[in-house]
Image (cartoon, coloured by chain):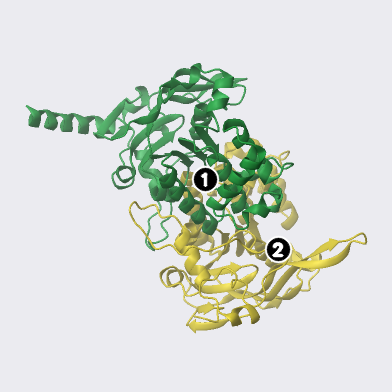
Amino acid sequence: MAGSAQVLYSVKGVKKYYPVKGGILRRIKNHVKAVDGISVDILKGETLGVVGESGCGKSTLGRTILGLEQLTEGNLVYNGTNISGYSKKELKPFKKEMQMIFQDPYASLNPKQTVGEALEEVFIIHTNLSGKERRENAIRLLKEVGLTEEHFDRYPHEFSGGQRQRIGIARAIAINPSFIVCDEPVSALDVSVQAQVIKLLQDLQKKHELTYLFVSHDLGVVRHLCNRVLVMYLGQMVELAPVDRLYENPVHPYTEALLSSIPRPVVGAKRDRIRLQGDLPSPANPPTGCPFHTRCPIAKDHCAAERPEWREIEEGHYIACHER
Amino acid sequence: MSESILSVNSMVTAFKTKDGLLPAVRGASFSVKKGETLCIVGESGCGKSITALSIMGLLPSNGKVTEGSITFENKNLLSLKQEELRKLRGNDISMIFQEPMTALNPVFTVGYQIREPLMIHQKLSKKEAHQKGIELLKRVGIPAPASRMNQYPHELSGGMRQRVMIAIALSCNPKLLVADEPTTALDVTIQAQIIDLLNDLKRDFNMSLIMITHDMGVVAEIADRVIVMYAGEIIENGTVSEIFNNPQHPYTRGLLSSVPNVDDPDFHLNPIAGTLPLLSEKISGCRFHPRCPHAMEKCRSVSPDAFQAAPTHSARCWLMEDEEVRQHGGQRASTV
């Protein structure tokens, strides 16, 4: 980070609800509150981790702030411009700035398109480069992500998972974006390959001064890669803190439980694990008050009644909890 | 020391493919003692799941154990007829799978599926089996077990489904449970619950457990002994503390330093270069040598034997040759 904490992308009270239709008239019966009021400033050059269990809305958050999902409510301010109401056409110059890396690179690449074509497509849409320049640029990108010129004319199925993810990354950085949402980019990879891709992401960030929003459920990877971490539960913010502070001194009972649940690759390290009872409630029918109160070991009566407010307990460390 | 309940001897499992007969497991030998948990670790395609399926006799139709033996309580599983194997499976050996949604039958209730093995193997009446089923669901920590018996798999969450799978697997008090990545599809808080449950059950039922996983954290929590597989071969075999505290094979070391440590802010990620070889790839010498930072001339041509680092700890790597000679020399000197 370049010393000054300049805000690149300000996410303000973002909500994303999906309607649940039912009955013979297909009326809207209910809403799945996938993202329910997220406000966070993403700083220039940082890697902001978003963690939580499946169904907590972390991926939807990433897609929503890239404009891939329509906002239900809230504001998105990119580099000082409020882009929340923008049409597709108005968004185009901003999309050049923001890219995404997906979890499953095989699903995000067109099987009928060679890798070279897939990379050139980005230049056709966003630039006026000639065919020769496009090819040169595509080859430069392949080399940058650790592939070679020979890979240009191959199809996605000829690559291993790790190589495919490298292609996904090459596509994302093709037009020099400043902001990339990485949605579980290494979860589908084997550990030895996962470590290589993490390294690549770090190198690229340094070289191109990228800002990452890193969505993951792997708390080990997040600790290694991120500067700050946002913990989500059922679409809501639970805790936000600088990475070391969060891992060494988690304050919210959910963060505590989450961290204590991770199996450590250390033998004989018997820990007091906080056993959470029960399962994640459905986001279509979230608990009242604090979303976590049904599983919380320290919940009191008022936790079920009132939603806790988001407050700063120390500089840069925020939580939403009545009891801590 | 109690004796081994299962022993696998230089087992080769091969698949008929359009590229010819390809071995997915190349001469695996290991044993499991009574009450012991053996973890098989490795990355995708290393043959760990195929090893489990070979033991269960559940290989796909184009796969076959072509060499070696699998002995379970003095019975050679490979010479048993399908019908005899079926009696053994579910009764003495059970298996749980990674994705409980695909392993459970979506059109039958939980109750039906849990009664089935009890009625077949233990010859219980439907009523008795129902009662036993409720007890089992209770034992694996499912709330309101009686009403769950009438529910279908899709009505349960992922963690609950895995508990149902475990209840079914345990229904006939198996002596050996084979678990293929049972927690991989689950969230961490649910994964922790399932690991605790497996540890409890293992103690209560005094059963042996073969756990297949790629997660080194899970291994450290549950294993007594660990075997590490790479490209179809067992490359290291030892107790859990030997593997984690004194790994011998460069691949095991690489695997351990590829997992970012949650507790260490300054953890240095040290990935293994290269990619996993394909099943059809011909590799001379040590199968790991193209990716190995210490590969020597010998590694490229001759496949290494298993060298002993300790009585319970062995690894297939030429780097250990000198060391073993030294140790053996030392040991012999002291006995003389």
User: According to the colouring, which chain is yellow?
Assistant: A
Q: Quadrant of residue A91?
A: bottom right
| Residue A324 on image: x %, y % | 49, 80
Image position of B257 (left or right of B334)? right
Same chain check for tags 2 and 1: yes
**Disc 2 crowd, CA 10 A, few/some/many (<14, 14-19, 20+):** some
- Helix, strand or loop under label 2: helix
Q: Quadrant of residue B299?
A: top left
State the residue lying farthest toward the right.
A25
The N terminus of chain B lies in quadrant: top left
Q: Earlier in the sequence, mark 2 or mark 1?
A: 2
The amino acid on which the numbered mark 1 sits, given as a three-letter code, is Gly
State the residue lying farthest toward the left.
B336
Q: Which residue was labeled with disc 2?
A: A95
- Helix, strand or loop under label 1: loop
* Rendered residue at 61%/65% (across/down): A179
User: According to the colouring, which chain is green?
Assistant: B
Q: Which residue was labeled with disc 1?
A: A146
Image position of B116 (left or right of B33)? right
| Residue A278 on image: x %, y % | 58, 61
The amino acid on which the numbered mark 2 sits, given as a three-letter code, is Lys
* Rendered residue at 56%/62% (across/down): A214
| Residue B325 on image: x %, y % | 18, 29
